[in-house]
Image (cartoon, helix red, strand yellow):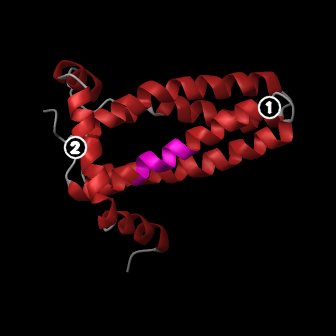
Amino acid sequence: MARLPARTLLLAEKLSIVDAPAGTLAVLLERAVPRPASRFLRGRWLGHPLHPIMVTVPIGAWMAVPVLDLTGQSTAARRLLAFGIAAAVPASMTGLVEYTTLDVPQRRVALVHVAANSVGISCFAQSWWRRRSSGGAGLAWTVVGLMTAGLGGALGGHLSYAQGAGVLRER
């Protein structure tokens, strides 16, 4: 029997209620991104998806923020939050073009992945904003952002490892 975290991730695959918005998002993204740009952002030139590489930059930045907070480097922590938010833009773009290649069960998980990461990025933005006057509130928002982005990352891992999203497609 699967453990609780694995069972929780499997639930996202069964969320048929999101099929209509998930399908609409795929169509909109396919229309919005020209094919050459989509191929580039998907990592066709690299031989494998670009998204897993790109997400390491904002994740690494955000993981370091509490360390800077604990060592009294609040200005550096705020700058690193901003850097992570900026780095999340191209990372998100690479993920959104990958979204157009997914099947229905993968789209279900991906839509929850997108939602969790969007909330996480919003938490980091709130942390950056709150740090202008209150470091404590900023740190709290960072912790919530890390937990939410962690859930998003677990869903992304499930997409790749359990559902095979992006695997061997570019060969």
- In front of the other: 71 or 16: 16
Q: Is 112 rendered above or below residue 128?
A: below
* Residue range of the region highlighted in magenta in the rendering: 112-119
**From the image, which quarter does the C terminus lie in?**
top left
Residue hosting label 2: 167
Q: Which residue is at 44% across, 68% downward?
A: 8
Q: Nearer the viewer, mark 1 or mark 2?
A: 1
Q: Position of residue 166 (x, y in %)?
A: 24, 42
Tell me how far mark 1 sits from mark 2, CA to CA: 40 Å
Q: Position of residue 15 (x, y in %)?
A: 34, 66
Q: Is 57 rendered above or below residue 118?
A: above
Q: Is residue 113 magenta-colored? A: yes
Per the image, label 2 sits on a secondary structure element best described as: loop
Q: Which residue is at 26% across, 27% downward?
A: 32
**From the image, which quarter does the N terminus lie in?**
bottom left
Q: Amino acid at mark 2?
A: Val
67 relative position to 47: left or right: right
139 relative position to 34: left or right: right
- In front of the other: 152 or 45: 152
Q: Residues within 10 Å of mark 1 (few under 14, many from 20)?
A: some
Residue hosting label 1: 131
Is residue 71 visible in the rendered structure shown here?
A: yes
Q: Is 143 rendered above or below residue 75?
A: below
Per the image, label 1 sits on a secondary structure element best described as: loop
